[in-house]
Amino acid sequence: MAERVLVVIPTYNECENLPQIVPAVLAQDPRIEILVVDDGSPDGTGALADRLAAADPRVHVLHRTTKEGLGRAYLAGFAWALPLGYDFIFEMDADFSHDPATIAKFLVAIQDADLVVGSRYATGVNVINWPMSRLLLSWFANKYVRWITRLPLTDATGGFKCFRREVLEAMSLDRIQSNGYTFQVEMSFRAWKRGFRIKEIPIVFVDRMEGQSKMNKKIVREAVWMVWWLRIQSILGRLT
């Protein structure tokens, strides 16, 4: 039986990008399906996603009524996917900062791994169109995360990932605390602490051309203290 692949794409005001990213992702492999998780976008992204789903059975839509953050959107997508038997479940942005052509490399890497993480820093710095201030913030944030948690990743905050379903099944998803970019750290950290095999592959990250970034000060504040919470919970044996 062919392996089933689901790409979860959270959206909030992504009507410019969605009509381009959906066919680009589907074109990478006939096994791929997409779940758009829309948080009640006021620009009509949810209705647009419904039209795309009506035109292609490989596209699905999960509507949420309020904007609750990236982490909550992904968790809702995982909860939707697991009962349906998908073998590999991706996290991916809607704005082409994650290149759909890289999906094939993830599907190769996941054959002998449980979680594959796309890294912007595995082979130097592979980020395009970011101002130096944001690049330095991201680079130092990853050094900070690794120093505190010992998580063996060069890019713990990146959001282009592929999970085996067994990894998500092993986690109590309702106990995930993070919601911003630290969500990515927490998911990888919990997988690592459970002994799952994690592999990084290099990616090139291109800052969005359409729409607005979701980065804000609240996300940064969460990142500062959440990694300490993870470290403490690990020491206390509460993450496994």
Image (cartoon, grey):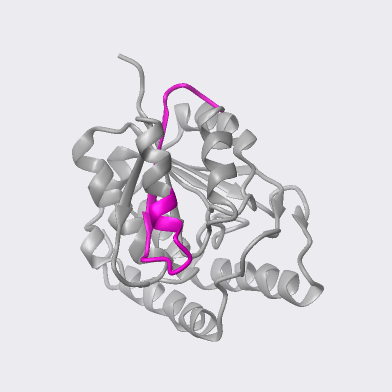
Q: Tell me if 189 is positioned left or right of 23 in this view.
A: left
Give how far across and how far down residue 189 sits, in percent. 42, 59
Q: Is residue 49 above or below residue 42?
A: above
Give how far across and how far down residue 95 sits, in percent. 60, 54
Image quarter of residue 69 = bottom left
Q: Which residues are magenta?
A: 28-48
| Closer to us: 34 or 65 | 65
Q: Tell me if 136 is positioned left or right of 12 in this view.
A: right
Q: Is residue 163 visible to the viewer in this orientation of the structure?
A: no
Q: Is residue 84 visible to the viewer in this orientation of the structure?
A: yes
Image quarter of residue 211 = bottom right
Farthest-out residue, top? 1
Tell me what residue is drawn at x 50 percent, y 68 percent: 181
Q: Tell me if 217 is positioned left or right of 195 in this view.
A: right
Would you say residue 47 sits in the magenta stretch?
A: yes
Farthest-out residue, left? 83
Q: Is residue 90 above or below residue 58?
A: below
Quadrant in which the N terminus appears: top left
Give how far across and how far down residue 90 sits, in percent. 44, 43
| Closer to us: 6 or 15 | 15
